Image (cartoon, rainbow, N blue to C red):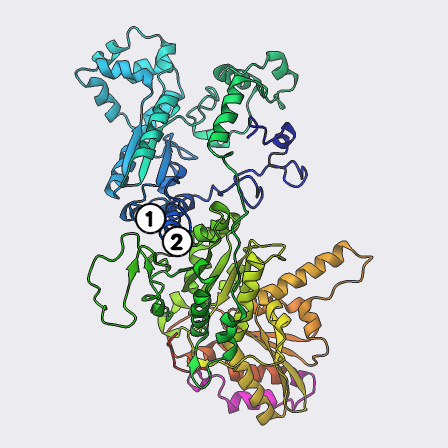
Amino acid sequence: AFMEGRLSEEDLDGFRQEKSREGHALSSYPHPRLMPQFWEFPTVSMGIGPMNAIYQAQSNRYLHNRGLKDTSDQQVWAFLGDGEMDEPESRGLLQLAANENLDNLNFVINCNLQRLDGPVRGNGKIMQELEAFFRGAGWNVIKVVWGREWDDLLTRDTDGSLVKIMNETPDGDYQTYKAESGGFVREHFFGKDPRTKDLVADLTDDQIWNLKRGGHDYRKVYAAYKAATEFKGKPTVILAKTVKGYGLGPHFEGRNATHQMKKLTLDDLKKFRDHLRIPVSDEQLEKDPYRPPYYHPGTDAPEIQYMMERRAALGGSVPERRSKHAEITLPEAKSYEVAKRGSGKQQAATTMAFVRLLKDLMRDKNFGKHIAPIIPDEARTFGMDAFFPTAKIYNPKGQNYLSVDRDLVLAYKESPAGQLIHPGINEAGAVAAFTAAGTAYATHGVPLVPVYVFYSMFGFQRTGDAFWAAADQMTRGFIIGATAGRTTLTGEGLQHADGHSPLLASTNPAVVTYDPAYGYEMGHIIRDGLERMYGPDSTDKNLMYYLTVYNEPIVQPAEPEELDVEGVIKGIYLLQPAKIDGPRTQLLASGVSVPWALEAQRILAEDWSVSADVWSVTSWNELRRDGLAAEEEAFLNPEQPARVPFVTRQLEGATGPVVAVSDYMKAVPDQIRQFIPNEYATLGADGFGFSDTRAAARRFFKNDTHSIVVRALEMLARRGEVDAQAPVKAIEKYRLHNVNAGTTGNAGGEA
């Protein structure tokens, strides 16, 4: 980029100084979020790069097969390391590329035989291992092992003695050879057999030292790349043998400590300059060993002219991020009507309310084609099998078998033009597909809106690093944590009981998290998300919306006429004011716990003459972000009147103690404690989940309806506003210590 004139010397001086050199700063690694016009893909999330490359290649074909863009000429390249291939994620999805014949995909694995601390396979041969693994997975394998300097020796190796030594020498020895000298290689490598020692008898030690590995021979690398791009029918992996620290001199090359060595001595600098034939004098280097000069041959130099001509012919610089995309028409208002209507007399979980809304959004004549639903083998669990016969499941090979459920209305149906991405039991691949689809606006100029639906426990806990990479690449889309809550999916037990995903999501700055109680709340949240991602007035479009939805059916109410839409979007609104006068309390609840708070409101009024307001908290996380932002503004602008956090403003005039409840750990509602002027208590589900009825689980964790009642009475009793014995009487009346006395929730389990 410096040679092409895209970066100046001042820019290079700003390397790894992103704030102190703002305007001329370069990020330490390729991070699109930090250099949004330059880098296209992030790297250095070990193992995630290979997965993302595979699904990027699939996404290219998905766009093509759905008729959204002609990608037939595009190639995806992933540059990886042999040490990185020990990450399970690096090898875990190779079969997808082979199964779908992704011959638009190329892996280049730099086999320098070293990890960060030592050899990858000191006693073995990593290139042979990787060749076997990739061939077994159905890939085309190209090996670039020896540079052209070896060609003459191999031609003269008529008895195979040289090849025998090559095959028997472990990687640990190859690493050692490159850290020694030509004489050492003559003695310890070629000297293993008199015949091979004779082969190099007429070579000097320098000539032996200059026998290059294939990855450092540009002719062989070019030949490998050319062969890869011309191969059809399978993905290709190029295994290129190299030396770690190549060209940096004897203190660096092949050393175990190379990764940690950050400084070149003056002598190292001079040797490096000589090796690369850079026309910089000793005097220039000696002037300041810590600031060697940059070298540029000048824009008129024939090499630069040639390079610029080639770049122009190829369509521009690489890398380059282009975020301008084709116009996208957001859904019409009528597409959200299903969310506003509620479910009438029928019960429906918030998962089903979401699925009905998604179905209508997909039917929107202008917008629907942009949606890319992603479901990892749980579509029937979430009630999304209704999409099978209409939207169909994406499979580039179609469906060439007789489906066992072909007679069903909701039969499994695959198609090359299918809209649903179905990675199988594969959350890591699903997030990779989400990332590829959610960045299509930049990589292809074609906006896609991925909607990834999964068991909430298997989202940020299982694939949090991949969501971080998605944020780095500025992915846009919706992440739907279904079967949410620690006590709501109780039959599945501990491993499925999500009591903490909002906290995990809160660590990702690009994720906007909501825990809606009703379908109409969801409608406004999704509309707001689409407008923030693709609306003309949005200032920060690169967001991922995380919505938790539940599998407990309730009657979904219709949208209230005077709904506080701003409150829904910003995180809290008054759902139902108290219906009687009396000692006052405030009940804050989110998601599945909102009906518990409404029931607690009724019990407090009927049994204890206590007046309770019920607030629906659609986002504890967003309320906290807003509160922290207000604090920061006040901290840095003490001369200005401090902005009041949104939650504080909403509760202004709301008297009495606050009880906050959710189906998550107490730390989730605790996020806003500092912004609540009232006395504040939280109820939640801390600890491991287990299998039982919902009512028993909620009674055990003490976040059920009667626990809300008792907690409110305790706080009011301390204030002298109700009888001091009221809490004790309530505990006895509702048998709060008896898990079998719980009544909160129902046994329904359909999505």
Which residue does the numbered mark 1 point to in the structure image?
Answer: 93
Q: The N terminus lies in which quarter of the figure? A: top right
Hey, which residue is sitting farthest front in the picture? 365
Query: Is disc 2 placed on a helix, strand or loop?
Result: helix
Badge 1 amino acid = Leu
Q: Quadrant of residue 5?
A: top right
Residue 621: x and y in percent read 58, 64
Q: Counting other residues with Cα less than 10 Å from the Cα at mark 1, is it few (<14), some (14-19), or many (20 or more)?
A: some
Badge 2 amino acid = Ala
Residue range (magenta): 716-744
Residue 238: x and y in percent read 33, 33
Q: Residue at x 51, y 51 (%)?
A: 326
Q: Quadrant of residue 223?
A: top left
Q: Counting other residues with Cα less than 10 Å from the Cα at mark 2, is it few (<14), some (14-19), or many (20 or more)?
A: many
Residue 513: x and y in percent read 54, 63
Q: Are marks 1 and 2 in contact (CB under 8 Å)?
A: yes
Quick check: 130 above or below 734? above
Which residue is more in the foreground, 699 or 490? 490
- C-alpha span from label 1 to label 2: 9 Å
Residue 729 counted in the magenta span = yes
What is the number of callouts on the image?
Answer: 2
Hey, which residue is sitting farthest right in the picture? 639
Which residue does the numbered mark 2 point to in the structure image?
Answer: 428
Residue 263: x and y in percent read 56, 26
Query: Is disc 1 placed on a helix, strand or loop?
Result: loop
Q: Can residue 193 be spotted in the picture?
A: no
